Image (cartoon, rainbow, N blue to C red):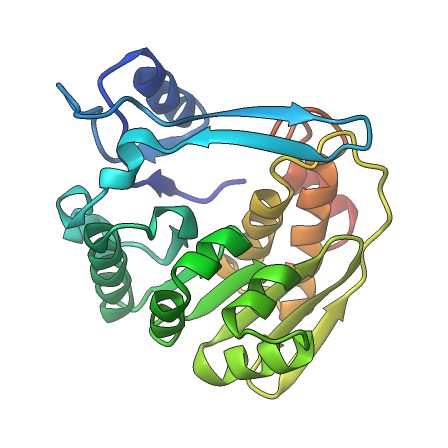
Amino acid sequence: MGLTTGFIGRVCDDELGHYYAKGMSDVGTDFVNSPVEYGELPTSRSMIFVSPDGERSMNTYLGISTELSSADVPEDVAGDCGLLVLEGYLFDKDKGKSAFLEAARACRAAGGKAGISLSDPFCVDRHRDGFRKLVKELDYVIGNEHEWQSLYQTESLGAALEQAAAESGLIACTRSGDDVVIVQGDETVRVPVDEVMPVDTTGAGDQFAAGFLYGVATGASMDVSGRMGCIAAAEVIAHYGARPEADVKAMFKAAGLI
């Protein structure tokens, strides 16, 4: 959508690794790390089965991506990043946690903003203490209602978001077909969601994050950023596949957001 982007990750020097790297480069994203020659594990992959109601089941193998470490995060890349997005799925190992912290600190020290997507309630359940500590060092956190409730071990979403806002910066919570809730300090914004019959819900959270963070990166308000996230998510669930098929930036313009 016109912003300069890069991807920090770990793939093997195999067919799938080169496919991922080329796919990123083809859409204009700098694939920072070269495929690992003689990698100890193959490149990650996921098989996704979509049911008639649009819901999906995922059989995921994280492979070599779980070996991400500080050595894979060039300081000049993290330090030159205006907006750093960390992916909760890679928080399993100590070296991954160290890489997250070092990248976030390098980004923030240079004046950028660093944040995380909580990814999945199972990730939160496994690493609750680590996530809680990390949230306090970040500028924004994105998650769905189940992830937030798991993080703060409460059935009250309001209480979870209030505590999150006290510990971090900008908080975004998606709630399937219900309003998105965005909190920063004492300010709370609710963004209505248009009801869409999903074809495939794969990528809905990622595309919400993409649209929302486009707004954050371009200085849009909380409300506008949330609406951008909702538009991007609605586009991707209207067809099979986790990447948009329409010009999302044009959709933002049509909605009067840019």
Q: How far across and down, in percent of the image, does residue 106 sit?
A: 21, 63
Q: Residue at x 41, y 47 (%)?
A: 89
Circle count: 0
Q: Quadrant of residue 108?
A: bottom left
Determine whether 9 is above or below 146 in the image.
Answer: above
Percent from the top left, x then y, of residue 232? 67, 44
On the image, which quarter does residue 81 sit in?
bottom left
Q: Is residue 246 visible?
A: yes
**Location of residue 126 with respect to 24 vertically, above or below:** below
**In percent of the image, x 75 and y 27: which residue is there?**
51
- Left or right, residue 70 beside residue 153: left
Left of 96 or right of it: where is 206?
Answer: right
Q: Residue at x 60, y 49 (%)?
A: 211
Q: Between residue 109 and residue 134, name the one nearer to us.
A: 134
Q: Quadrant of residue 149?
A: bottom right
Residue drawn 34% across the image and 40% down it? 6
Q: Position of residue 86 (x, y in %)?
A: 38, 53
Q: Is residue 117 visible?
A: no
| 2 relative position to 222: left or right | left
Q: Residue furthest bottom?
A: 186
